[in-house]
Amino acid sequence: MCEQYPDDLNSQFHPDLSPLGWHLGHCVYTETYWVKEQLLCDPSPDQELRSHYVPELAKKLDRGKILPDHFELCKWASESQLENLELLIKYQDRHYQNRKHQNSNKHELMRHQFLVHFLTQHYAQHFETMHMVLVQRALKNTVNFFVQQPLASSDINTSTIVLNSGDYTVGAQTDFLPYDNEYPPHEFRTGDIQFSDKPVSNSEFLLFMEESGYQTQEYWGQQGWQWKEKYNISCPEYWLQDSQQNWFGVDIEGPHELDPEFPVWGLNYFEALAVANWAGGRLPHESEWEAAKQHDFLKNTGQVWEWCQNSFHPYQGSTQGFRAFPYDSYSIPYFDGSHFVMKGASRYTQEVIQRSSFRNYYQADKRYQFAGCRLVFE
């Protein structure tokens, strides 16, 4: 991806999103750290690289300034990835030979190939974030677009899918692929839940706007209203208007006319709550969403991330609770009550993290991610 945008490698298009080149450097540095230092006990990663690519050590607004040029960055990245792959293959071969001689003590990181899965998923998450950067780039470069077929509003969808009452097990039920915050598996009990059979669409959200959804305080709650008023928000993140005041959307390819049936995206948690309140529904709890998805009750997923009503929190099972792995700070800092869960996937989400137990999470005010919402009706 970075090779397609060499002129924008160091550019920061949103204050919360690092430059494309930093995401590449961070992923490769992270891979090198876990393979060399943690798996092979070789404390060799360069300290300068550490200061550049460890998030806590590099201020976001400074990251574009510290990146090497395009050629140097891509050369280092490709060489490092090849070296790390060779080291992993050698480790596996050595372990296989030791196992034949009953002299095997496999590292915890490599049980069920955990480290390989962990790094693959890490790349996938940053790959999607890089797409967020590119949409922000397109947003800033959009000029002189004229809508040929203006978006028309439509009533909220009332077709529902019912998750029947019962006891359901949610959370990770394998011991190798998921992240620590997906454990332990646990049960929850629910009555019948009526899910909308699809996420809120562009045309439905337009009706929310036309009916003064952004101007009606009762839909928002105190924090949401304060955020909306502070930033003078009146539409989704990726909606703009042409000279005739007709709405259009922006994605990686640039401006486009809004498909009335496609899920609205570019919403934060506050906006998702507001449209749910306006429609007379609510957002689903993540356990409800996950149970419905597991049992194939939930349709039309995978187009946008879907906000859930609950904050990101550690799971508690019947016999054990959350255990941080492979390091304490992967999930724990985000169990702060200000990050909220999104479930599902967007069209930019890699398959490796498209599982029902995967938990995405963002602060309530963030809206650059590819997020919309699905409603539950009582």
Image (cartoon, grey):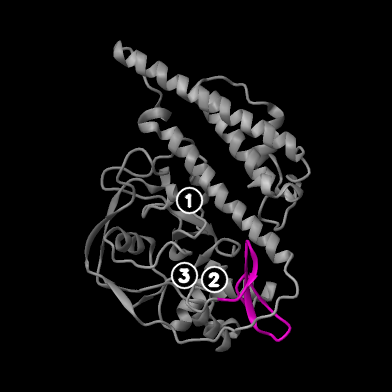
Check whether the beta carbons of the residues at disc 3 and disc 1 lie within 8 A of each other. Answer: no
Please give the residue where the numbered disc 2 appears in the rendered image: 270
Q: Earlier in the sequence, mark 3 or mark 1?
A: 1
Please give the residue where the numbered disc 1 appears in the rendered image: 350
Which sits in the foreground, 121 or 141?
141
Residue displayed at 53% across by 30% down: 34
The quarter of the picture where the C terminus appears is: bottom left
Question: Count of labels shown?
Answer: 3
Q: Is residue 259 above or below residue 338?
A: below
Which sits in the foreground, 49 or 298?
298
Q: What's under tag 1, amino acid-wise?
A: Gln
Q: Is residue 303 above or below residue 33?
A: below
Q: Earlier in the sequence, mark 3 or mark 2?
A: 2
How far is the residue under mark 3 from the one under mark 2?
Answer: 11 Å
Residue displayed at 46% across by 60% down: 342
Which sits in the foreground, 206 or 193?
206
Which sits in the foreground, 18 or 79?
79
What's the mark number on residue 283?
none
The residue tagged with tag 3: helix, strand or loop? loop
Please give the residue where the numbered disc 3 appears in the rendered image: 373
Measured as percent of width and height from the top left, residue 320 is found at: 30, 42
